Amino acid sequence: MNFGTNTETNMRNQPGSGKTNKVVLGVLIGIVVLLGGMNSFAMVQFGHVGLYKTFGKLGDQTLEPGVHLKVPFIQSVIQVNTKVMKVEADATASSRDLQPVSTHVALNYSINKAAAFEIMNDIGPGYETVIIAPAIQEVVKEVTARYPAEDLITKRDVVAAEIREQLTARVGRYNLVVNDINIVNFKFSDAFDQSIEAKQVAQQQALKAENDLKRIEIEAKQKIAQAQAEAEALKLKKQEVTPELVQLKQIEVQEKALEKWDGRLPTVTGGATPFIDLNSLGSNAAGAKQP
């Protein structure tokens, strides 16, 4: 007996079996078409550019932000960030006077949008690790070694400008753009920090002593000027004193004394000069005239 043949015959003879197979096939085709349609578009985000990748090969066509067509299941679109990015790094070196210094810098950079294909094809997405980080280390060490430790502090803007100039030239060869660089901090040894602090204290004390000396000199000059002015005034007063002026002052004193006198003469006086009692003399004279 041939059970297999009979089973196939029975299935063919079953009503609706052919329609079911067609429906399933149609659904599968629809799913494939839907997936293919969905896979035919790619979105490039704002602040990025896109590059086609076909079977692992990178295309040199640069795609701007927006929706783009691609071959389903064959092509993909990789996105390259063109926004300004930030990387921070520490570089340890020695200054020109052999002081150990650790420099913490913050670098803002971006990629040349027109050269996105060259960057991704020649370097890959790890350009920050491959290019940026080593360049920061090398340039910062090279520049800090040209300056004494104190100049690194007092001329920070000059040092930062030189670091930026050298970094721009170094990473520019790889189509990377340096937007800005900031020296966040210089860190020196404890001994150097103490020497700087002591120097600042000494400078402040010297400045205070200088200011005190200037103040004393000014006060002395003021006193001399005041004394000279007083001497000059006294000299002028002496020149103004004349015999006529003395006599006039005496007359003024006598006039003031007469204004205060009540008209009575003193009856008693002391000292070597005798004083005559005019009242008693007047009384005696009157008594002598009476019979």
Image: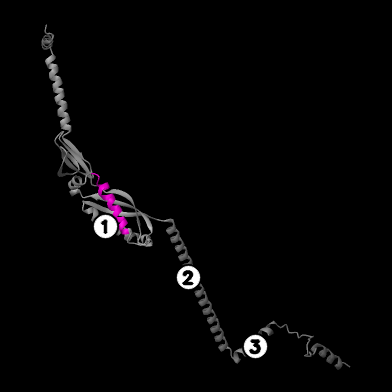
Q: Position of residue 207 (x, y in %)?
A: 46, 68
Q: Secondary structure at mark 1?
A: helix
Q: Are marks 2 and 3 in contact (CB under 8 Å)?
A: no
Q: Quadrant of residue 94?
A: bottom left
| Quadrant (top left, top right, bottom left, bottom right) of the N terminus | top left
Sequence-earlier tag: 3 or 1: 1
Q: Nearer the viewer, mark 2 or mark 3?
A: 2
- Residue in the foreground of this view, choosing between 150 and 72: 150
Specify few, some or many for label 2: CA neighbours under 10 Å numbering under 14, 14-19, or 20 or more: few
Q: Quadrant of residue 38?
A: top left
Q: Which residue is mark 3?
A: 250
- Residue in the foreground of this view, choosing between 244 and 97: 97
Q: Which residue is mark 2?
A: 210
Sequence-earlier tag: 2 or 3: 2
In-image side of 93 versus 29 (left or right) = right
| Residue type beneath disc 1 | Gln
Give me the C-alpha separation between circle 2 and circle 3. Answer: 56 Å
Give me the C-alpha separation between circle 3 and circle 1. Answer: 96 Å
Tell me which residue sits at (25%, 47%) in the image. Answer: 130
Residue 287, labelled with which disc? none
Residue 135 within the segment the image draws in magenta: yes
Magenta part of the chain: 125-143
Q: Position of residue 228 (x, y in %)?
A: 53, 82
| Quadrant (top left, top right, bottom left, bottom right) of the C terminus | bottom right
Sequence-earlier tag: 1 or 2: 1
Q: With respect to residue 74, does 258 lie above or below?
A: below
| Residue type beneath disc 3 | Gln
Q: Are marks 3 and 1 in contact (CB under 8 Å)?
A: no
Residue 197 within the segment the image draws in magenta: no
Give me the C-alpha separation between circle 1 and circle 2. Answer: 43 Å
Q: With respect to residue 16, does 55 lie above or below?
A: below
Q: Which residue is mark 1?
A: 166
